[in-house]
Image: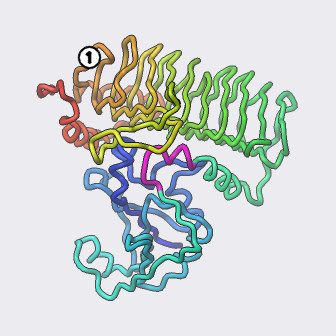
Amino acid sequence: MANIILFDSDARDHLLPLTATRPMGELRLGILTLREKWERRLKGTVSYITQEYLQEKFPIQIEEENLIINGGVLPTPQLCERIEALGLNEALLRNGELIAARLNEAQFELLLGEEEVNELQGQELESSIPLLEITNLWQLTKLNEQALIEDFALITAGRHTAPVSHTNRIIGPMENLFLEDGIEMEYCTINVRTGPVYIGKGVEVMEGGMFRGPIAIGEHSIMKMGVRIYGPCTFGPGCRVGGEVTRSIFMANANKAHDGYLGDSVLGEWCNLGADTNNSNLKNNYTEVKLWDYATERFEKSGQQFVGLFMGDHSKCAINTMFNTGTVVGVFANIYGAGFPRNFIPDFSWGGPDGYRTYKFLEACETAALVMGRRKQEFTETEKAILYHLYDQTARFRSWDKGAE
């Protein structure tokens, strides 16, 4: 079994706030996370070279032979075949940037120490091999359709779907629908002519749900009555979804349980959108959307016409919240109030259009423990240390911050 080590590239900072609490390989795209894709494609186990403050939660595993891979790269069959063909201490490059390498333990230790790696043979990746790499937030929603289709084929190959109740209406070929065991679903409409639909173990889909593929619903999620989902959409494990959603990704354990619209958006874990929350994903003048970039600390052109909401882990908003086109919300923000909030809401913000204060760190931790406890998950000291690092490092974005404790 291959020992795979995914490393965070420089693109990691452009993917904040989603990468503030996880390595790049833990981002979800399609049905699977990037880590899960590599593990299935290369038949191995993954660990990480990531930020120092994340390393305890995501430890590195070094063996006698190791495959080192850029954590933001998507594993296509052609690329995986090329990586598997690498000899010991050979590296694969694209325009001089490291894509993958096969290193023995001694050479890898040199790499970790940022010393020159001796005898490493670099070779340029052939132009005939496509390379898909996530370097910006908006790429997640743009690449999700292709990833859904590829993951569906990978996961369902040689398997049979669980039975579909006769009360449901399926439009299109049955081979485009796959249900894992333990699903509750009655009187729903699923259109698989537009793309495959995958529903994970223990999912509850309440009556009247309408789905238009491609869509993935992670295990133990709940789709509320009359939910309307236009693919491509991905909902990771443990999500609660209602209302109308299109071209969006929920990493895991995120809630949008009520009516309201969400489009071209990505939610981190433990987020909660209040009832009748809506977001804009298209400017009234139909022009290109700019999006906040943590790396450059300014709004950057996306080159895209449809860009919605990007929300970091543990952030929440009150009922009737209205998000403008191309809004970035950091980790642990709590948003409320009439009118449109600003297009960039810093980490640990509390407030809305009428003004903000700092979400005090201990209060945030108390909330996290309660929220995670409801899903029988523990808020650990490791999690607390990660959040404290973020609380400290993002203080400069909170212009109103007067040293709140």
Q: Is residue 278 above or below residue 393?
A: above
For the C terminus, the quadrant is top left
Q: Amino acid at mark 1?
A: Gly
Q: Residue at horizontal 29%, vertical 55%?
A: 51
Q: Residue 135 lies in magenta, yes or no?
A: yes
Q: Secondary structure at mark 1?
A: strand
Q: Residue at horizontal 33%, vertical 39%?
A: 299
Q: Residue furthest right?
A: 166
Q: Residue furthest left?
A: 403
- In the rendered structure, the answer to whether residue 265 lies left or right of residue 119 reads right
Q: Residues within 10 Å of mark 1 (few under 14, many from 20)?
A: few
Viewer-nearest residue: 75 or 291: 291
Residue 78, given in percent of the width and then of the height, sits at 61, 71
Q: Residue 64 lies in magenta, yes or no?
A: no
Residue 13, given in percent of the width and then of the height, sits at 33, 50
Q: Residue at horizontal 78%, vertical 41%?
A: 192
Which stretch is magenta? 134-143
Viewer-nearest residue: 21 or 75: 75
Q: Is residue 122 visible?
A: yes
Identify the main secondary structure in magenta. helix
Determine which residue is flagged by label 1.
355
Q: Is residue 15 above or below residue 288?
A: below
Callout count: 1
Viewer-nearest residue: 256 or 93: 93
Q: Is residue 21 visible?
A: no
Residue 21, given in percent of the width and then of the height, sits at 35, 44
Displayed quadrant of residue 372: top left
